[in-house]
Amino acid sequence: MKTIKPNGKQLTGSEEGFSLIELLIASFILGIGVLSVTTMIGTSLSRNFSSKNDTIAMAAAELLMEQLKTTDFTSLTPGGSTLEADGRLLFEDSSTGAAYAVVNNYWRDIPLANSDEAGQTVTYQVRWNIAVAFNDTQNRLLRITIGARRQPSNLRLPPVQLVFIKAE
């Protein structure tokens, strides 16, 4: 098939345009690339938010850890928030989603500056558990587990946890 210009001259192979099929294929490939980039941007924004939350929650847990480290050993009483069999501190029942009640003297709400909005604060609930460590029969080692999570709770943002040992 010969292609003719409006002025009546015949087009050579290098002067002919794209066919509709070539244009559709190029559009499809471009669409896949754009879709991939948009998905990647959404994922990175979500991961960035989660990472920022973990960092702030860890700062709240570390703040309490430093306070407990300086507390006199004899004034630390074993007990506190519920621990899972594997040692994780629980904020809610994983099967029902119901929150575990806080235990008096073993929890605190810590307000911290919100880095996303100037002048705003974000509250993190910090809970802890104190237990005798490693079957210590003389009660000279305490295993202190501290967990922190953003309030109100958000299932996308699980609590962070610190564990340290305090000796008499």
Image (cartoon, rainbow, N blue to C red):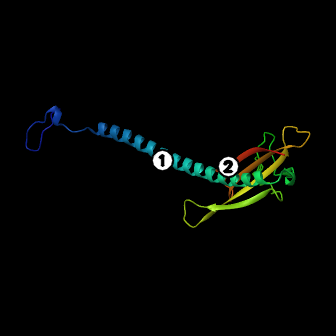
- Looking at the image, which residue is at 44% across and 44% down? 37
Q: Position of residue 61 (x, y in %)?
A: 70, 52
Q: Position of residue 26 (x, y in %)?
A: 33, 39
Q: Amino acid at mark 2?
A: Pro
- Looking at the image, which residue is at 84% across and 50% down? 73
- Looking at the image, which residue is at 84% across and 41% down? 133
Q: Is residue 91 visible?
A: no
Q: Is residue 135 left or right of residue 40?
A: right
Marks 2,1: beta carbons within 8 A: no
Q: Which residue is mark 1?
A: 41
Label ID, residue 54: none
Residue sitting at the far right? 137
Against 144, is 115 above or below? below
Label ID, residue 158: 2
Q: Position of residue 21 (x, y in %)?
A: 31, 37
Q: Is residue 66 left or right of residue 42?
A: right
**Quadrant of residue 1 in the image?**
top left
